[in-house]
Amino acid sequence: MIKAAEELFAEYGHENVSLRQLTSHAGVNVAAVNYHFGSKELLVEAVFQTLVQRVCDQRELALEKLERGDTLTLEEVVRSFVDPYLGNGNEKQGALLARFLMRNRLYPTDGTRRVVSEYLDPMAKKYIAAFAQVCPKLSKEQLVWRYLFMTNTLAASSAGDNLSRRLESLSPDTGKAELQDRREAMIEFLISAFR
């Protein structure tokens, strides 16, 4: 049921998916949502937690791999953070996570606060430590601020397709922005923010 919900939420937004659509897509009856989750809102929180866990696992593996290498670089750390949002095949995951994170900032619940505290805060501390290794001249406070600005920038630019349309309207000669172009522009921007 969580996988079906994630697919529909990524496509239409969780606010626009009815329980009937969700249960039809999952091949279960409406009572199953209440039985397993208690409510649609608790199912939404379960999807948020599942998504956050997956992204944190991806980032954890990426950081471990980088730390086993010869030299950790700023670009590698930034790329490992961006990839779960904009890496190949992660676009829907990134957009859905970005929407959930933005919603949590505006309308936090006890459940979403718990997910942030349990998964995102420890991962943030690991990234801040990795950035401290590759940006030794920055103070802890500067690193935290830049990390927060990075997460907000990435979430805001990953939440939907409007960024590509906005680029086309501001710079019609540029043409359609491909995901790879957006990803590389984001990485370049974030690297410059930590220098």
Image: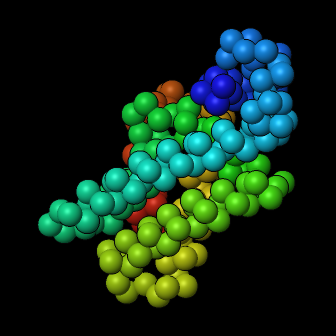
Q: Residue 69: image x %, image y %?
A: 18, 62
At x 25%, y 65%, the residue is 67
Structure colour scheme: rainbow
Residue 35 or residue 162, whichever sits in front = 35
Q: Quadrant of the N terminus?
A: top right
Residue 29's place in the image compared with 8, above or below, is above
Residue 147's place in the image compared with 190, above or below, is below
In this view, the residue farthest toward the left is: 70
Q: Residue 70: image x %, image y %?
A: 14, 66
Q: Quadrant of the C terminus?
A: bottom left
Left or right of 20: which side holds 122?
A: left
Residue 156 or residue 110, whichever sits in front = 110
At x 47%, y 35%, the residue is 90
Left or right of 39: which side holds 171?
A: left
Residue 135 or residue 124, whichever sits in front = 124
Q: Is residue 108 visible?
A: no
Please identify the quarter of the rendering in which residue 11 is found: top right
Left or right of 89: which side holds 122?
A: right
Q: How many marks?
A: 0
At x 41%, y 76%, the residue is 129
At x 49%, y 47%, the residue is 55
Residue 21's place in the image compared with 96, above or below, is above
Q: Residue 117: image x %, image y %?
A: 64, 65
Q: Is residue 153 visible?
A: yes
Q: Residue 150: image x %, image y %?
A: 54, 62
Please identify the quarter of the rendering in which residue 73 is found: bottom left
Residue 183's place in the image compared with 106, above or below, is above
Left or right of 7: which side holds 180?
A: left
